[in-house]
Image (cartoon, rainbow, N blue to C red):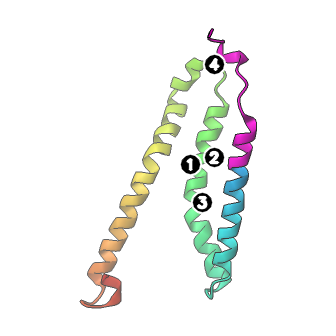
Amino acid sequence: MALRPLTTVALPRTSVLRRLLLAAVLGGVLVLVLSLLPDHWLTFAWVSVLGMAPVMAVYVNAGTRLGEVSAPAGLLSPPVLGSLVVLGVFPLLAKRGLEACRRRRAQKAPRGSIETL
C-alpha cells in the first residue's frame, strides 16, 4: 500500500461537527438543569459568567494569535508562544487558586462544622 501525501487525505469533517454539536447540546442541557434549581437565577448568571470569563479570555487570546500566523515559522513568535503557555498554565493556576480558597475557608470554619468536611 503506497502512502499518499497528507494534502490528498480527506479529513472527516462530520466527526468534528458531531463533537461540536454534542458539546453544545450537553452544555445547553446542563445550563437548563442548573437554571431549574432553587437558587436565584441572578446568582446562577453571575457565577456562570465569573467562572467562564477567564477561560474564554484565554481561549480567545490563543485563537487570535494563532489566526495571525501565516507561515510555520510564525508559530515560534513570542506572542503565539506566550498565548500557548498561558493556555497550558491557566488550568494549573486556577486549580491552585481554588485549593488555596478551600484551605482558607476550612481554617476559618469552626471545628466540627459542615464546611470543614
Q: Which amino acid does label 4 sit on?
A: Ala
Dot 2 and dot 4 residues touching (CB under 8 Å): no
Callout 1: SS: helix
Dot 3 and dot 2 residues touching (CB under 8 Å): no
Label 4, residues with CA under 10 Å away: few <14, some 14-19, many ≥20: few
Q: What residue type is labelled 3?
A: Ala
Determine which of the numbered discs, if any, sits on residue 71 in the image.
Answer: 4
Q: Sequence-wise, which precedes: disc 2 or disc 4?
A: 2
Q: Which residue lies furthest to the left in this view?
A: 111
Dot 2 and dot 1 residues touching (CB under 8 Å): yes
Q: Which amino acid does label 1 sit on?
A: Val
Q: Which residue lies furthest to the top in this view?
A: 2
Q: Quadrant of the C terminus?
A: bottom left
Q: Residue at x 75, y 40 (%)?
A: 14
Q: Sequence-wise, which precedes: disc 3 or disc 1?
A: 3
Magenta span includes 8: yes
Specify whether 20 is left or right of 54.
Answer: right
Callout 3: SS: helix
Q: State the image coordinates of residue 80 (x, y, percent, origin top left).
A: 54, 32
Q: What residue does disc 3 label?
A: 53
Determine which of the numbered discs, if any, sits on residue 60 in the image.
Answer: 2
Q: Which quadrant of the figure has residue 36?
A: bottom right
What whole-number distance in Å separates the C-alpha atoms at marks 3 and 1? 9 Å
Q: State the image coordinates of residue 69 (x, y, percent, origin top left).
A: 64, 26
